[in-house]
C-alpha cells in the first residue's frame, strides 16, 4: 500500500494523509506497515514517531541533507529500520543516478533548443522510476542541482498544464532553483509566490525540505523568512549546519547585522561552531561584498571559537581577495612565533590572550556543576577514590603545576627511564613552583628521588590503572587560572560536556595552561616547546589581515601557528624587506613545515603564489 501511496503523492502529501488518518483513528496504514505501527500508541507519541518515520523515508530517498543528523536523533529500533531502508535506498540511489545521467544526456542532446510538451511527455514515459520518487521530482531535483532555470521553468509550465498540480517536493526544488539563481527583485517575488503556496499546503515541513527552502530564501530579499523556517525545524529536529550556514550567508549578503549576530548566536547553541570553518571560503567571499562591520563581526566569531581556515581552501581564499580587491594585497603564508606572538613575515604583534578571572570562575563552577556532579565524570574511579582525591586537593592545593606522571614516563621508549620524570618535576621545582604529581600505583617505583625534594611535591597515586583526565582538570581548576597541566592527553574533549556557550572559554583556558609540547635536550634538560599564549587571528591590523590556517595534527592539537599574512599594498611600502625566521632550523624540521630554504630570503612581491603543497601533505 505504501508503494502505491508513495508513487501517487509527494512526501508532504503522504504526511498530511497519515496525520489525518491517524487523528481519525483510521488504522489501516498502521496495521499493514510495520514501521508505522508505533503510530497507534498515543496521539502525541504518534505524531512524533510519524515525523521521525517520515524523516526515515526522506533519509532513504532523500536528495540532500545530513544522514548522520537523523541517525543521532533516533533510537536503536528505528536505526535497524533505517539500515533496512538504507539498503533499499542504496539501490534506488544507484538507479536514480543512472536516471539523472540519462536526463542530462537528453538535455545536452537538445543543444539549447526549447523544450516542447512532447519532450516532457517522452521523459515522463521513458523515465518513470519504479520504487523511487516520481519522474518530475527527479527532473526538478536535477535542474535544481544544475541551476538550470530555463528548463526548470519549462518543466513547471508543463506540469501546470497537466490535470494534477505539481507535488510539494517538486515545488520545493523549483523554489530552491528560483531562489538560488535569482538576480532580480522580480525573480525574488516569483520565488516568494511558490514559497507561500508551499506553506499554504502544509504548516509542517521536514528538515530536508527546509534545507532547500532556506538555501533558496537566503539568496532573495525574503531571506528573513529563514528565521521562521528555523523555528519550524526546531519543532521536530535539531537545526543542522547547512540551514544555519545558509541563513548566515543570507544575513551577510543583505548586510543585516542584527541577523548576522542572532544567527551566530544560534550556531553557538545548536552546533559545534568549528563546523562552520568548512564553509570559510564562501563566508569570506560573501563578507567581502558586505559591510566592514559585518565582516568584523563574523571574523570576531571565528576568533572567539578558534575557527581555523581549511588549508585546502587557502588558495581559493587568496583568489577571492584578489578578485574582490585587485592589487590591494600582498599575501604570504607565514606563522605567528609562539614565544613573541609576532608574525614572522610582517612583524605584526598579535594580541596576548588570557581569560579573565571571572571567566575562569565561570568555567570552574560549570566544570564542577555539569561535569563532576552532573555526569559523574570520574568514571574510571570509585566514589571513595574521588572523595579521597577531593580531600587531598583541599589539603595540599592550590598548585602551580599539575603533572601527568604516567604520560611523561610513557613518552619514553622502553625501557622506561625514571630520570625523565625526575627532570620534569625538577624543572618546575627549581622555579619554586608548587607541584602536584599525579599517577597510578605503577609510578611508585620511579619516584624515590622526587620524594627527597625539599619542599616535597604533592604526590597522588590512584588505585586505577590510569588517573582519569578529570583528576588533572579538577586539580588545576581548584587551583589558579594559570596553573599549568603537563600532559599530552586530549583533555580538550571535556569541553563537549560543558554548556555550548562556555566551550570556547574552556578551550581557551586549556590552550593557555596545557603543556603538551615538551622534549629533553641533548643534555637531558626538560624543555617546553610551543605554547598558545597569543591569538593567531583572524586579526585585522592597520595594514592588513592575519587568517589562521588549520594545520592541526596529532602532535599539535591546537594547531601549528600557520597564518595567511595579508599586507595592504596601498599602505605598506612595497620595497622588499628581509624576513628573519625566528624558528630555528631544528624547530622547523621538528614541525615538518617548509617555509623556504635555510638562508634564503623570501621576497615580497605582488600576488606571489603561496606554496602550500608542503603544508597540504600534512
Ligand atoms: Zn604578517
Image (cartoon, rainbow, N blue to C red):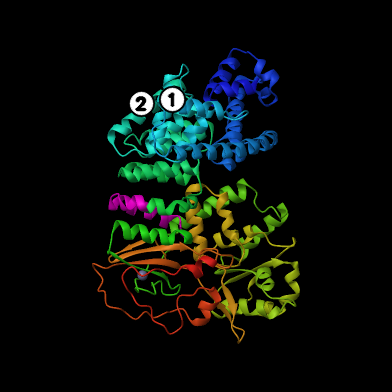
| Mark nearer the viewer, 2 or 1 | 1
Please tell me whether mark 1 sits on a helix, a strand or a loop.
Answer: helix
Marker disc for residue 415: none
Residue 4, percent from left and from top = 62, 20
Q: Residue at x 56, y 48 (%)?
A: 369
Viewer-closest of 363 and 492 = 492
Q: How crowded is the residue under tag 2: few (<14 C-alpha within 10 Å), some, or many (20+)?
A: few
Task: Give the residue number, with chain letter if any, for mark 2.
Answer: 193
Left or right: 372, with 147 as reference point: right
Viewer-closest of 265 and 289 = 289
Left or right: 577, with 588 as reference point: left
Q: Residue at x 46, y 53 (%)?
A: 277
Task: Give the residue number, with chain letter if any, for mark 1.
Answer: 117
Determine whether 258 is above or below 117 in the image. below
CA separation in Å, label 2 and label 1: 24 Å
Residue labelled 2 has its Cβ within 8 Å of some atom of ligand 1? no
Quadrant of the rendered image containing residue 71? top right
State which tag comes first along the sequence, 2 or 1: 1
Determine whether 20 is above or below 606 in the image. above
Highlighted magenta segment, given as a residue range:
285-309
Please tell me whether mark 2 sits on a helix, a strand or a loop.
Answer: helix
Give the overall secondary structure of the magenta segment.
helix
Residue 221, percent from left and from top = 31, 36
Left or right: 441, with 555 as reference point: right
Q: Quadrant of ligand 1?
A: bottom left
- Asked whether disc 2 touches disc 1, contact meaning CB atoms under 8 Å apart, the reply is no
Residue 375, percent from left and from top = 63, 47
Quadrant of the rendered image containing residue 304? bottom left
Residue found at the very far bottom of the displayed protein? 523
Amino acid at each position: 500500500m505504501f508503494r502505491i501511496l508513495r508513487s501517487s503523492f509527494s512526501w508532504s502529501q503522504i504526511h498530511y494523509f497519515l496525520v489525518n488518518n491517524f487523528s481519525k483513528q483510521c488504522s489501516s496504514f498502521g496495521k499493514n506497515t510495520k514501521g508505522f505501527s508505533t503510530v497507534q500508541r498515543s496521539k502525541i507519541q504518534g505524531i512524533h514517531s510519524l515525523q521521525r518515520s517520515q524523516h526515515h523515508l526522506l533519509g532513504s530517498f532523500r536528495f540532500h541533507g545530513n544522514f548522520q543528523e537523523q541517525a543521532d536523533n533516533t533510537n536503536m529500533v528505528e536505526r535497524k529500520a533505517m539500515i533496512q531502508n538504507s539498503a533499499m535506498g542504496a539501490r534506488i540511489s544507484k538507479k536514480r543516478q543512472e536516471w539523472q545521467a540519462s536526463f542530462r544526456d537528453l538535455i545536452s542532446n537538445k543543444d539549447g533548443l526549447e523544450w516542447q510538451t512532447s519532450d516532457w511527455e517522452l521523459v515522463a514515459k521513458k523515465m518513470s522510476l519504479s520504487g523511487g520518487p516520481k519522474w518530475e521530482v527527479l527532473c526538478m531535483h536535477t535542474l535544481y542541482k544544475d541551476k538550470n532555470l530555463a528548463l526548470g521553468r519549462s518543466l513547471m509550465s508543463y506540469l501546470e498544464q497537466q490535470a494534477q498540480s505539481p507535488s510539494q517536493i517538486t515545488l520545493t526544488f523549483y523554489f530552491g532553483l528560483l531562489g538560488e539563481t535569482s538576480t532580480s527583485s522580480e525573480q525574488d517575488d516569483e520565488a516568494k509566490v511558490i514559497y507561500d503556496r508551499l506553506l499554504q499546503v502544509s504548516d509542517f515541513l521536514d528538515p530536508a525540505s527546509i534545507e532547500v527552502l532556506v538555501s533558496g530564501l537566503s539568496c532573495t530579499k525574503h531571506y528573513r523568512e529563514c528565521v521562521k523556517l528555523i523555528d519550524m525545524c526546531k519543532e521536530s529536529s535539531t537545526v543542522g549546519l547547512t540551514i544555519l550556514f545558509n541563513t548566515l550567508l543570507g544575513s551577510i549578503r543583505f548586510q543585516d547585522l542584527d541577523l548576522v549576530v542572532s544567527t551566530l548566536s544560534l550556531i553557538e547553541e545548536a552546533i559545534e561552531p568549528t563546523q562552520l570553518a568548512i564553509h570559510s571560503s564562501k563566508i569570506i567571499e560573501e563578507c567581502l561584498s558586505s559591510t566592514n562591520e559585518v565582516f568584523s563581526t563574523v571574523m570576531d566569531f571565528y576568533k572567539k571559537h578558534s575557527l581555523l581556515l581549511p588549508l585546502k581552501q587557502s588558495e581559493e581564499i587568496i583568489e577571492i581577495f584578489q578578485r574582490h580587491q585587485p592589487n590591494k594585497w600582498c599575501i604570504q603564508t607565514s606563522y605567528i612565533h609562539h614565544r613573541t606572538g609576532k608574525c614572522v613575515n610582517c612583524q605584526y604583534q598579535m594580541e596576548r590572550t588570557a581569560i579573565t578571572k571571572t571567566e575562569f570562575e565561570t568555567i570552574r563552577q560549570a566544570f564542577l556543576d555539569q561535569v563532576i556532579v552532573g555526569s559523574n565524570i570520574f568514571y574510571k574511579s570509585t566514589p571513595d577514590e574521588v572523595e579521597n582525591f577531593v580531600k587531598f586537593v583541599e589539603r595540599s592545593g592550590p598548585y602551580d603545576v599539575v603533572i601527568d606522571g604516567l604520560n611523561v614516563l610513557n613518552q619514553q621508549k622502553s625501557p622506561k627511564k625514571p630520570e625523565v620524570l625526575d627532570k620534569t618535576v625538577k624543572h618546575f621545582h627549581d622555579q619554586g613552583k608548587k607541584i602536584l604529581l599525579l599517577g597510578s600505583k605503577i609510578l611508585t617505583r620511579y619516584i624515590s628521588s622526587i620524594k627527597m625534594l625539599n619542599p616535597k611535591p604533592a604526590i597522588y597515586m590512584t588505585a586505577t590503572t590510569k588517573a582519569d583526565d578529570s583528576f588533572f582538570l579538577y586539580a588545576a581548576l581548584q587551583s589558579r587560572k594559570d596553573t599549568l597541566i603537563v600532559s599530552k592527553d586530549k583533555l580538550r574533549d571535556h569541553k563537549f560536556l560543558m554548556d555550548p556557550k562556555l566551550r570556547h572559554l574552556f578551550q581557551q583556558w586549556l590552550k593557555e595552561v596545557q603543556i603538551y609540547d615538551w622534549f629533553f635536550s641533548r643534555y637531558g634538560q626538560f624543555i617546553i616547546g610551543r605554547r598558545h599564549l597569543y591569538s593567531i587571528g583572524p586579526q585585522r591590523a592597520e595594514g592588513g589581515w592575519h587568517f589562521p590556517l588549520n594545520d592541526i595534527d596529532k602532535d599539535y592539537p591546537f594547531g601549528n601557528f600557520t597564518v595567511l599574512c595579508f599586507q595592504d599594498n596601498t599602505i605598506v611600502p612595497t620595497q622588499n624587506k628581509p624576513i628573519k625566521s625566528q624558528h630555528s632550523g631544528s624547530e622547523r624540521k621538528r614541525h615538518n613545515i617548509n617555509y623556504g630554504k635555510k638562508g634564503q630570503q623570501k621576497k615580497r612581491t605582488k600576488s606571489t603564489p603561496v606554496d602550500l603543497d608542503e603544508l597540504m601533505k600534512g
